[in-house]
Image: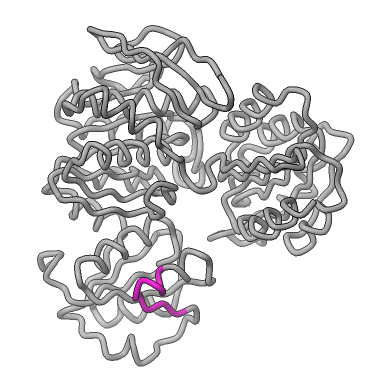
């Protein structure tokens, strides 16, 4: 393979994916010609096109593809796409075709790489690490799995000494990285279509942790068995780095942060949830070890605005509250609902949930049913299939899942009819949650509630 930067054209197969789009933005910012295909047009692909990236939504070999030469074109694809005519064309014509994770690994190989892994929490933690790096003006670039509310992107370039990456466990992609620093937030069972069982996914995280050269630069949530020496972090219990004394005052969360040698009181931010303080603890531990002073870190924590679709909250003058979140695993849903119940215990909660993948719905059906049963009312949308086909998962439907939910007020809906059903409901708090295309409800909902 040629040196990565020597290609002139970069074609992305599945460019609308959150991880793929960050890479596309990197090469586009580097002055390269970036093109791509995706199945559907979304807010993200629309934004990419505004940034000058050429995207098509039909699986055809058009003139823009046929004029590309294999000598100066690199093709990057996501393993979420199994079969595609465009991908077949590039392979048959002997173009250099690489997985997204491989390319990300090559980009970060010559940087001081900070990789954040975990089945939950990795997007918030990696975005927060990136935000702290930016506020400290460190020379870094970041490749994230979510859109930062602070810099309105999943990619930022501020130099190349450091790189911050979200280390994706799907398809064991994170094993292609070369992390100098790493965080492991969680190792819960997920992606069982890839790993088979919980034991194998835990082994995958141990293999990832083994890539970090220095025990002192590996930060693992306390209680996880990662198979080697490391630094621990926690909330409300002692660890190498931990936070405690959490309290809430006027929608702000205060907490104290402890290192092995000192205590720093009264960090404050507006991001709710104990799990998010845990994510902040990991980020603070790394930036402290990079030599950033606590005054800078306090200021940065205070102005962190979060990530789009990670507990994005709107409070309206009419008293209604709308929260939108990307959670697509029972543990994540529990964390979101638990935060809502903690801060708003008396308010009536309507949950609209879109399951993501037939395989995940099948593997965690009982967990989903239990977490969804904690709402006051539920609208369950059809399963978002992504890369999967219903014919391979006979009987795994939202109707099947709904029967397991222990709730009096529950119903199923397709996405197109969901907004009208929401408008008929009596609620104090509306939570839309899921990782598919449920985000298309966001704009209509915010506009409607603001006019009530």
Give the residues in magenta: 48-56
| Vertical position of residue 342 compared to residue 151: above or below | above
Q: Nearer the viewer, residue 266 or 382?
A: 266
Residue at 66% across, 29% down: 340
Residue 367 found in image quarter: top right
Determine whether, in the image, residue 22 is placed left or right of residue 320: left
Residue at 47% across, 10% down: 245
Q: Position of residue 257 (x, y in %)?
A: 35, 15
Determine whether, in the image, residue 207 is placed left or right of residue 222: left
Residue 419 found in image quarter: bottom right
Determine whether, in the image, residue 8 is placed left or right of residue 331: left
Q: How many labels sit on residues? A: 0
Q: Nearer the viewer, residue 20 or 444?
A: 444
| Vertical position of residue 87 compared to residue 296: above or below | below
Q: Is residue 55 magenta?
A: yes
Residue at 74% across, 51% down: 449
Q: Quadrant of the N terminus?
A: bottom left
């Amino acid at each position: 393979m040629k040196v990565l930067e020597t290609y002139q054209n970069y074609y992305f197969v599945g460019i609308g994916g959150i991880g793929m789009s960050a890479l596309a933005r990197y090469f586009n910012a580097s002055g390269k010609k970036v093109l791509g295909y995706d199945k559907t047009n979304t807010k993200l692909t629309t934004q990419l096109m505004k940034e000058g990236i050429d995207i098509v939504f039909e699986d055809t070999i058009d003139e823009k593809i046929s004029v590309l030469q294999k000598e100066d074109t690199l093709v990057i694809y996501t393993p979420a796409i199994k079969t595609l005519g465009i991908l077949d064309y590039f392979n048959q014509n002997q173009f250099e075709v690489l997985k997204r994770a491989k390319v990300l690994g090559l980009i970060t190989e010559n940087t001081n790489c900070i990789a954040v892994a975990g089945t939950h929490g990795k997007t918030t933690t990696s975005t927060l690490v990136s935000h702290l790096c930016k506020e400290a003006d460190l020379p870094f670039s970041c490749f994230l799995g979510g859109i930062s509310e602070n810099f309105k992107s999943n990619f930022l370039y501020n130099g190349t000494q450091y790189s911050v990456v979200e280390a994706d466990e799907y398809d064991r992609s994170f094993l292609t990285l070369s992390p100098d620093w790493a965080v492991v937030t969680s190792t819960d069972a997920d992606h069982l279509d890839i790993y088979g069982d919980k034991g194998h996914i835990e082994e995958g995280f141990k293999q990832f942790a083994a890539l970090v050269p220095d025990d002192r630069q590996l930060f693992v949530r306390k209680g996880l068995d990662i198979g080697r020496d490391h630094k621990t972090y926690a909330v409300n219990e002692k660890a190498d780095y931990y936070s405690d004394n959490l309290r809430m005052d006027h929608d702000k969360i205060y907490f104290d942060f402890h290192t092995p040698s000192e205590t720093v009181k009264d960090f404050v931010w507006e991001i709710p949830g104990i799990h998010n303080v845990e994510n902040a603890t990991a980020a603070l531990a790394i930036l402290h070890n990079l030599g950033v002073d606590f005054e800078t870190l306090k200021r940065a924590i205070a102005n962190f605005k979060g990530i789009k679709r990670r507990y994005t909250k709107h409070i309206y003058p009419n008293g209604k509250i709308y929260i939108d979140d990307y959670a697509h695993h029972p543990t994540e849903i529990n964390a979101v609902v638990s935060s809502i119940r903690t801060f708003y215990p008396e308010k009536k909660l309507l949950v609209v949930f879109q399951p993501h993948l037939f395989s995940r719905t099948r593997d965690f059906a009982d967990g989903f049913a239990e977490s969804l049963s904690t709402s006051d009312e539920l609208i369950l949308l059809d399963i978002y299939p992504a890369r999967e086909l219903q014919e391979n998962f006979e009987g795994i439907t939202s109707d099947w899942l709904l029967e397991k939910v222990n709730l009096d007020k529950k119903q199923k809906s397709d996405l197109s009819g969901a907004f009208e059903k929401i408008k008929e409901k009596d609620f104090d708090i509306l939570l839309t949650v899921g990782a598919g295309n449920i985000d298309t409800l966001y704009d209509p909902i915010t506009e409607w509630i603001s006019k009530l």
